[in-house]
């Protein structure tokens, strides 16, 4: 969709994060449970921080979690975040979040009342900019807007005796989801006018806008990834989805050596069938991490570095240093696979290579970089005699590479696999 209108939007977001996590079955509220090394709420915050036209993000937490949330914001370097104490119910918490924009001063910084405010659950981490922009623009036009999804199950009503009374025609109804967006004055006035009963037992913000501001929300069909982490199994599903997203971009780095270029080309041809976006480049052409990221028009978390000699780590060390100095490793773990070429039927020991990889992996882990090693059989002298050998090695290597970047297993750090 056309993103041009976002430039004229003055938008902010309120993320209620005061849930107790009772349905999760644990003592830790679900928004603070660890997913891929960080609290779940961090993944949601990053989804909003990537959206530059959302100027302020207000996180509303229970009073007992206020210090914890502030610590998370500082530890993981989140920006544009204001943390406030919520109320005893969902609506009271959201109302507290809205009040901050009129108070003006919080955490030593001034936040201004926005034209449009987006409300989104802190435990829905997979929201994309497209749906945020759709609800924001629709809210500016209609006063309120929200994402909806088709009902998965038919809704039925039971009689006092516990028998089926009637069912609803599923095609006529939709499940209300997040995000939802409102003209700020419309939703704020609705909260000012609503009853104590609404504040204590209500859950639907779109209903308040309709009931107390006479505003009919525009309903927009949302993507399937808007689901809410509710149960313990959802945490595993969330981690799997994040890993899948991280594995969709891969950068193959070679030097100008003929053998490295040949292997890089073969890897590119194999891996493009398994990974959405694969590009092969020469590291000498890119001086900063931003240069590397620009070729993907976003963020890349996976890199292959080809070293010509079996015991050579020079190219991999250069890449790891570049990534560490680029300071992009605080979000998700980066994967670097150090590829080394070995002569067919060579009996020489790979002890030197193994020691170097382990030392590099140990140091890189401190910067959230996961380093793995892979030996691929290749020799220019032997290639004419057995061209299929390289193809087999690269094919096997591609399968290992795909698994490494999708699983991102810390237990394999510094290990060298051979094909």
Image (cartoon, rainbow, N blue to C red):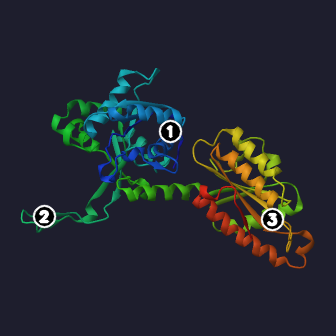
Drawn side of residue 156 relative to residue 342, left or right: left
Image height of 15 relative to 103, above or below: below
Residue plotted at (42% across, 44% down): 32
Upstream in the sequence, badge 2 or badge 3?
A: 2
Residue plotted at (47% across, 33% down): 71
The answer for how far apart the CA atoms under marks 1 and 3 are is: 44 Å
The answer for how far apart the CA atoms under marks 1 and 2 are is: 46 Å
User: From where the camera sits, is residue 278 visible?
Assistant: yes
Upstream in the sequence, badge 1 or badge 2?
A: 1
Q: Which of 63 and 108 is in front in this view?
A: 63
**Is label 1 in a helix, a strand or a loop?**
helix
Name the image quarter holding residue 84.
top left
Name the image quarter holding residue 341.
bottom right
- Residue pushed farthest left? 161
Q: Name the residue under label 3.
A: 263
Q: Where is residue 319 in the image (x, y as percent from the top left)?
A: 75, 47
Q: Name the residue under label 2.
A: 158
Residue plotted at (38% across, 52% down): 229
Residue plotted at (16% across, 38% down): 197
């Amino acid at each position: 969709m056309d993103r041009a209108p976002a430039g004229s939007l003055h938008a902010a977001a309120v993320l209620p994060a005061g849930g107790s996590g009772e349905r999760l079955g644990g003592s830790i509220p679900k928004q603070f449970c660890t997913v891929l090394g960080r609290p779940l709420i961090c993944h949601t915050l990053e989804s909003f921080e990537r959206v530059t036209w959302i100027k302020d993000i207000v996180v509303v937490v229970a009073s007992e979690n206020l210090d914890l949330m502030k610590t998370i914001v500082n530890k993981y370097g989140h920006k544009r975040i204001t943390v406030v104490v919520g109320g005893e119910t969902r609506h009271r918490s959201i109302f507290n979040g809205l009040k901050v924009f009129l108070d003006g001063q919080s955490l030593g910084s001034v936040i201004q009342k926005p034209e449009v405010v987006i409300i989104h659950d802190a435990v829905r981490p997979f929201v994309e900019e497209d749906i945020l922009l759709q609800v924001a623009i629709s809210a500016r036009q209609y006063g309120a807007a929200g994402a909806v999804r088709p009902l998965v199950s038919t809704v039925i009503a039971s009689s006092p005796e516990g028998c089926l009374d009637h069912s609803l025609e599923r095609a006529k109804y939709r499940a209300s989801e997040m995000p939802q967006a409102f003209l700020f004055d419309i939703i704020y006035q609705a909260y000012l006018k609503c009853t104590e009963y609404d504040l204590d037992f209500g859950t639907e913000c779109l209903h308040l806008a309709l009931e107390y501001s006479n505003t009919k929300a525009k309903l927009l069909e949302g993507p399937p990834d808007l689901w809410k982490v509710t149960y313990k199994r959802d945490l595993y599903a969330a981690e799997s989805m994040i890993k899948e997203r991280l594995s969709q971009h891969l950068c193959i780095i070679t030097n100008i050596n003929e053998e490295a270029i040949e292997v890089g080309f073969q890897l590119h041809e194999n891996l493009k069938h398994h990974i959405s976006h694969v590009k092969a480049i020469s590291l000498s052409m890119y001086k900063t991490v931003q240069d590397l990221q620009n070729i993907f028009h976003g963020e890349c978390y996976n890199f292959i570095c080809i070293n010509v000699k079996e015991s050579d780590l020079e190219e991999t060390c250069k890449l790891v240093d570049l990534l560490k100095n680029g300071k992009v490793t605080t979000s998700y773990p980066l994967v670097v696979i150090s590829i080394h070429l070995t002569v067919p039927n060579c009996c020489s020991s790979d002890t030197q290579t193994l020691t170097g990889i382990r030392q590099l992996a140990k140091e890189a882990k401190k910067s959230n970089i996961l380093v793995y090693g892979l030996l691929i059989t290749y020799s220019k002298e032997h290639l004419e005699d057995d061209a299929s050998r390289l193809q087999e090695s690269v094919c096997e290597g591609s399968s290992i590479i795909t698994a490494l970047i999708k699983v991102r297993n810390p237990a394999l750090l510094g290990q060298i696999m051979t094909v």
